[in-house]
Image: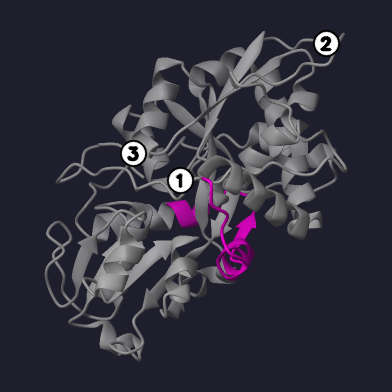
């Protein structure tokens, strides 16, 4: 999902996952509908305003952005913000969200690791900070079992990834290299043919036989399984403790400096939202599918949403060490010049929130502000 940055070749954003907004039931925190048609949340009468009149947040209507979707829809963020109004925007690609952050159209965003890295390095470390985690996992290698029966059988086959240089593309190229196979990162040609394919059309490409498998995020992976595909590898199995970042929270450095209390309030909302999702996974999943049907006219069948939802874990920890590793993989693949990521994280506000909740601090892997 990256924006352009000093690459050997410009990289583009990962294709957005199919539309999915999470609108949860009225039980618990907040209510069914807390946002009007203009993207403004309802402010409680008499609520005390923080240092800003409003805060503008952006996210993707994706399963991997469940923290933002649930926190917005259930009114958890707005409750923490008091009289400061929450305004929301949704995006379908990383570049447009980074542009919105740079222009001031949004102040805080949920976004994948590649665009966060790219946005930071392109601005020479002046545009954004990563202030928290959101999601881990949810990426799988799904193959045609008639053509590929083992990992070694992937050699010589055509495997789709969402887009050149996106997070999954880099992960697959790194895995290919770990097998000792040679593939040109830019063209995708070599011992394995890497076919860059929009997630929205990957199931059709699989059905037509133009690809033999795909290294893709959910729910695309589960859609392929329902077409007869087999999960050959879950990317989580390649990472320590089976955790790796797929969605971060970012903030404009200007907004963080001017309104730290507002940023802290949104982070409190994020932490409380993640706790609610973990405590009510079935309610969250069911409500998410109801919202999907309303938005797209078609809900995901249970045999797609059940495994997709299960494979994604919400997290407050941004898993900083894995972001650094992902950047190293892009460098090794020849897609990225060695980036200077020192200062990309500012986890002080999040750790303040966690400490107040009696929870341990999270680490920045040496990439935090001093």
Q: Position of residue 339 (x, y in %)?
A: 31, 43
Which of pointers 3 and 2 indicates the residue nearer the eye?
A: 2
Question: Dot 2 lies on which element?
Answer: loop
Q: Which residue is mark 1?
A: 112
Q: Judge whether 143 appears above or below 277 on screen.
A: below
Q: Nearer the viewer, residue 294 or 364?
A: 294
Magenta span includes 336: no
Name the residue rendered at 74%, 42% in the picture: 273
Decide: few, some or many residues near mark 1? Use Cα within 10 Å; few <14, some 14-19, many ≥20.
many
Name the residue rendered at 87%, 43% in the picture: 27
Q: Which of marks 2 and 1 precedes in the sequence?
A: 2
Question: Dot 3 lies on which element?
Answer: helix
Which mark, residue 48?
2
Q: Position of residue 169 (x, y in %)?
A: 31, 59
Q: Judge whether 309 appears above or below 276 on screen.
A: below
Q: Using residue 336 as the reference point, say whether residue 258 is left or right of it.
A: right
Question: Dot 1 lies on which element?
Answer: loop
Q: Which residue is mark 3?
A: 118
Distance of label 1 from label 2 (alpha carbons):
33 Å
Q: Please indicate, yes or no, whether residue 31 appears anywhere in the rendered image.
A: yes
Q: Nearer the viewer, residue 225 or 342?
A: 225
Distance of label 1 from label 3 (alpha carbons):
10 Å
């Amino acid at each position: 999902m990256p924006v352009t940055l000093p690459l050997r070749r410009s990289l583009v954003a990962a294709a957005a996952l199919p539309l999915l907004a999470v609108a949860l039931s009225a039980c618990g925190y907040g209510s069914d509908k807390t946002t009007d048609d203009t993207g403004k949340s309802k402010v409680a009468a008499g609520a005390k305003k923080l240092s800003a009149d409003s805060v503008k947040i952006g996210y993707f209507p994706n399963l991997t952005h469940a923290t933002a979707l649930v926190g917005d829809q259930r009114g958890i963020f707005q409750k923490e913000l008091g009289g400061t109004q929450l305004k929301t925007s949704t995006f379908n690609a990383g570049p447009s969200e980074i542009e919105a952050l740079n222009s001031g159209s949004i102040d805080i965003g949920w976004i994948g690791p590649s665009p966060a890295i790219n946005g930071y390095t392109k601005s020479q470390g002046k545009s954004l900070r990563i202030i928290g985690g959101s999601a881990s996992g949810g990426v799988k290698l799904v193959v045609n079992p008639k053509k590929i029966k083992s990992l070694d059988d992937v050699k010589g086959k055509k495997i789709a990834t969402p887009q050149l240089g996106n997070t999954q593309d880099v992960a697959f190229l790194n895995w290919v290299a770990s097998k000792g196979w040679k593939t040109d990162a830019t063209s995708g040609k070599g011992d394995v043919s890497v076919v860059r394919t929009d997630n929205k059309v990957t199931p059709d490409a699989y059905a037509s036989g133009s690809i033999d498998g795909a290294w893709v995020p959910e729910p695309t992976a589960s859609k392929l399984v329902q077409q007869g595909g087999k999960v050959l590898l879950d990317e989580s199995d390649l990472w320590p403790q089976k955790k790796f970042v797929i969605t971060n929270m970012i903030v404009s450095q200007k907004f963080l400096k001017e309104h730290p209390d507002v940023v802290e309030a949104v982070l409190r909302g994020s932490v409380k939202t993640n706790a609610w999702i973990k405590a009510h996974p079935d309610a969250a999943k069911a409500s998410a599918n109801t919202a999907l049907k309303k938005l797209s006219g078609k809900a995901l069948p249970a045999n797609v949403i059940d495994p997709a939802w299960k494979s994604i874990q919400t997290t407050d920890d941004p898993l900083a060490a894995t972001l650094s590793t992902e950047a190293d993989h892009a460098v090794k693949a020849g897609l990225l010049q060695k980036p200077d990521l020192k200062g990309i994280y500012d986890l002080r506000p999040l750790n303040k929130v966690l400490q107040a909740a009696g929870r341990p601090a999270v680490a920045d892997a040496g990439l935090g502000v001093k």
